[in-house]
Amino acid sequence: MEPSSSVVARLGIAQTLAWGSTYYLPAMLATPMAKDLGVSTPTIFAAFSVALVVSALLGPTAGRMIDRTGGRSVLVATSMVFAIGLAGLGVAQGAAGLFAAWVILGIGMGAGLYEAAFATLVALYGNRSRGAITGITLIAGFASTVGWPLSTFMEAHIGWRGACLSWAALHLTLGLALNLSMPRVTATATAPGNATPPTGDDRTPPADERAQRAASYALAFVFAATWFISTAMAAHLPRLLQAGGASLSTAVMVGALIGPAQVGARILEFGLLRKVHPLLSARIAAALHPLGALAFGLVGAPAAALFGVLHGAGNGILTIAKGTLPLVIFGPGGYGHRQGVLMAPARVAQALAPWVFGMCLDQFGGKSLWLSSGLGVASIAVLLIMTQGNGYRPKAA
């Protein structure tokens, strides 16, 4: 079955809502939330980090459920979980309520963000999912563009509690309707033993268990390293650029370039790069952050915009690679569970990134880019050796 543009559009909108109301929520609401609850702003982000750890622990189980039943029932359940968590956040009266609400949201995040959406597409379309995965990320790439202004608007008019309750209502109406509209997939179609055999440009999975394990470790490292980089930049980019000599206005301008660069790169991947193996796309993407950091380190403020565009473009393509590389290397059988396992270290790295990189900034200033660039270079090295020693051999075109 060929991917349906209607399914991609509906799932993309649902993902935009899911990301905008969870991952991008603290950036806009943390300060008023902390003031009202009588806690520090770092406490708000600590609760958010707990949610990320919970999502990492739950991811493999959620993926296995999607493998067995298809994604519709899981995504429908997450709409209700998101609503409960956001409603709990909206009525929280202290630190205990805050952390409890974010634990619930972490459950929803573990079963309802990109990994679940990608697994749903693979359950529906098997090896033909690459274009659909790219389409999802194109639409949901605007989650911050939609989520940040909407959260800010609601906070200004109905307070942060009203904003959380409004997001909860959106999950119970729009999100639930979109996820209910997903096609059903039979258990037979999604069972690991009934995976659709590769055809056309599909690549042969590793031949033995040892090779699969090596490839899994390699991808888990790449995903953890690149998510650490993207989360660290999302949390600290303005401060980092100023530490490197850029003005505040320049830092804000560069931050505004990240989103368009991500979407532009995904459009490029959907058009030109879809004709090449996703391993090559991932190698190119992993190189962009270190290249941008090198330019910024050598030139300083005049290269800040170049750094922002290269980082954003690399991050945009790597988001797609997180969905397509496991599919191409291992095939669609058991994709959801494998995706959850591969992304578990990335979620933990994501939870630690703001704290670790923030400490580096305090200690080393702009030289902290050595850490993120080093992780980027290590990712490139791992991706380069994945054609050797991991049992992975792309077929000739």
Image: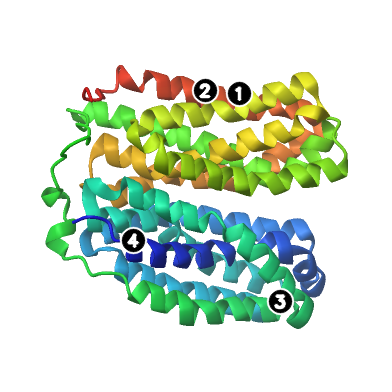
Disc nearest the viewer among 3 and 1: 3
* Amino acid, disc 2: Ala
Could you tell whether 114 is left or right of 93 in the image? left
Disc nearest the viewer among 1 and 4: 4
Q: Which residue is painted at 37% across and 50% down in the image?
A: 133
- Label 1 close to label 2 by CB (< 8 Å): yes
- Label 2 close to label 3 by CB (< 8 Å): no
Could you tell whether 342 is left or right of 307 in the image? left
Q: Is residue 340 above or below residue 210?
A: below
- Label 4 close to label 2 by CB (< 8 Å): no
Could you tell which of marks 1 and 4 lies nearer the N-terminus?
A: 4
Could you tell which of marks 3 and 1 lies nearer the N-terminus?
A: 3
Could you tell which of marks 2 and 3 lies nearer the N-terminus?
A: 3
Q: Where is mark 3, residue-wise?
A: 154
**What is the spatial separation of the Cα atoms under label 3 and label 4, in whole angstroms?**
32 Å
Q: Where is mark 2, residue-wise?
A: 378
Q: Where is mark 1, residue-wise?
A: 374
Disc nearest the viewer among 4 and 2: 4
Q: Where is mark 4, residue-wise?
A: 5
Total marks shown come to: 4
